[in-house]
Amino acid sequence: MALHAPARACPRSLDGDRLHLLATGQRAGTWVGIHKTSFVVWLAVASVHILVYVWRLPALVFDRRAPGFAVRMGLVAAALVIGLWVADETALHDRFT
């Protein structure tokens, strides 16, 4: 829970920087550096957040007692099938021969 506040603050910082850069049209300077730094901080915080909570995911998804078990299983299966299909369609096998 200690990362909850930074995990919520970093995307807002990125949004503010992005809006400033879009409004002013800057492509170099201090604000670009601030934006890049905000992105690196956000990436680090998001990575730690994911690594902390990913271990809880199987217990939540495969809990038969929680309502909506069949819907969750259907969504997980659909996501896996669509992900495998997209991976197969975008693979570079035999495209250049």
Image: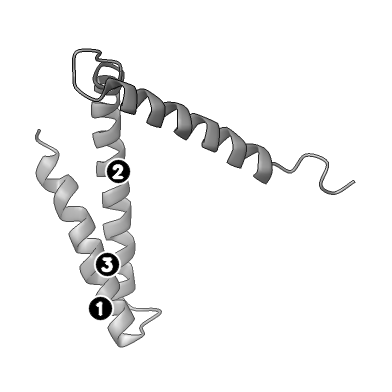
Marks 2 and 1, how far apart at CA: 23 Å
Q: Where is residue 73 in the image (x, y as percent from the top left)?
A: 37, 23
Name the secondary structure under disc 1.
helix
Q: Quadrant of the N terminus?
A: top left
Q: Residue furthest bottom?
A: 24
* Residue indicated by mark 2: 44
Q: Earlier in the sequence, mark 2 or mark 1?
A: 1
Q: In this view, does 81 lie above or below 9?
A: above
Q: Which residue lies furthest to the top in this view?
A: 64
Q: Which amino acid does label 3 sit on?
A: Ile
Q: How crowded is mark 1: few (under 14 residues within 10 Å), some or many (20 or more)?
A: some
Q: Which residue lies furthest to the right in this view?
A: 97
* Residue indicated by mark 1: 20
- Of badges 2 and 1, nearer the viewer stands 1
**Residue at coordinates 9% horizontally, 35% vertically from top-left?**
2
Q: Residues within 10 Å of mark 2 (few under 14, many from 20)?
A: few
Location of residue 38 by image quarter: bottom left
**Residue at coordinates 34% horizontally, 62% vertically from top-left?**
36
Marks 3 and 2, how far apart at CA: 15 Å
* Residue indicated by mark 3: 34
Q: Where is residue 41 in the image (x, y as percent from the top left)?
A: 26, 51
Name the secondary structure under disc 2.
helix
Circles 3 and 1, Cβ within 8 Å, touching? The answer is no
Q: Is residue 11 above or below residue 93?
A: below
**Residue at coordinates 25% horizontally, 78% vertically from top-left?**
20
